[in-house]
């Protein structure tokens, strides 16, 4: 049975990929990233909380996967914009390939339709 810690690790890996994927389209700031994710997630938008997003962005930046700069905001306070680094792009490519492999494995096993039961007329 999965533990909360295991669930958190799976979600953490997925969120890294999703945030990097949003930034693949171009630089964005925290709230803009959150808006993009909310649109993509639809009814699952509560997966990522603001309290999760900013530490995640800082962690990805410390790992060298993101770079940031400040720009003036619409209301005067500067916004911190994030962009993928070359290392971030390479990491995203590897991670997407890993998720494709996981998705294919799940599709072949857990998510596959159950086999048809043998026809009872075929039994002796």
Image (cartoon, helix red, strand yellow):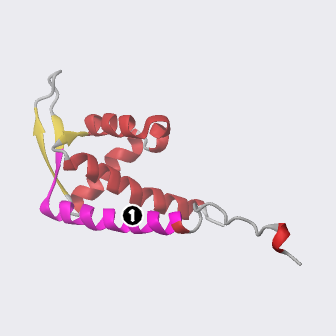
Would residue 64 be seen by someone viewing this image from the given angle? no
Q: Is residue 19 above or below residue 33?
A: below
Specify the farthest residue to the right. 124
Write the start and end of the magenta stretch as one range: 82-107
**For the point 38% across and 36% down, which residue is it?**
38
Give the percent coordinates (x, y) of residue 54.
Answer: 32, 45
The residue lying toward the viewer, choosing from 75 and 92, is: 92
Specify the farthest residue to the top. 75
Q: Is residue 75 above or below residue 2?
A: above
Q: How many marks?
A: 1
Q: Secondary structure at mark 1?
A: helix
Is residue 84 shown in magenta? yes
**For the point 29% across and 57% down, which residue is it?**
59
Name the image quarter holding the N terminus.
bottom right
Give the percent coordinates (x, y) of residue 13.
Answer: 40, 60
Specify the farthest residue to the bottom. 124
Label 1 neighbour load within 10 Å: few <14, some 14-19, many 20+: some
Is residue 101 shown in magenta? yes
Q: Is residue 12 left or right of residue 32?
A: right
Would residue 35 be seen by someone viewing this image from the given angle? yes
Magenta segment's dominant SS is helix
Residue 34, image quadrant: top left
Q: Is residue 58 above or below residue 99?
A: above
The residue lying toward the viewer, choosing from 16 and 101, is: 101
**For the point 19% across and 45% down, which residue is it?**
25
Q: Is residue 120 left or right of residue 62?
A: right
- Location of mark 1 (residue): 99
Name the image quarter holding the C terminus.
bottom right
**For the point 36% across and 68% down, which residue is it?**
98
Give the percent coordinates (x, y) of residue 2.
Answer: 61, 65
């Amino acid at each position: 049975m999965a533990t909360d810690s295991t669930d958190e690790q799976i979600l953490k890996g997925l969120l890294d990929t999703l945030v990097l994927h949003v930034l693949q389209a171009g630089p964005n700031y925290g709230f803009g990233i959150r808006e993009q994710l909310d649109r993509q997630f639809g009814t699952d938008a509560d997966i990522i909380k603001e309290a999760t997003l900013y530490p995640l962005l800082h962690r990805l930046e410390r790992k060298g996967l993101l770079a940031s700069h400040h720009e003036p905001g619409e209301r005067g306070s500067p916004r911190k914009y994030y962009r993928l680094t070359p290392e971030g792009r390479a990491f995203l490519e590897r991670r997407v390939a890993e998720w494709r492999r996981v998705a294919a494995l799940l599709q072949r096993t857990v998510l596959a339709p159950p086999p048809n039961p043998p026809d009872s007329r075929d039994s002796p």
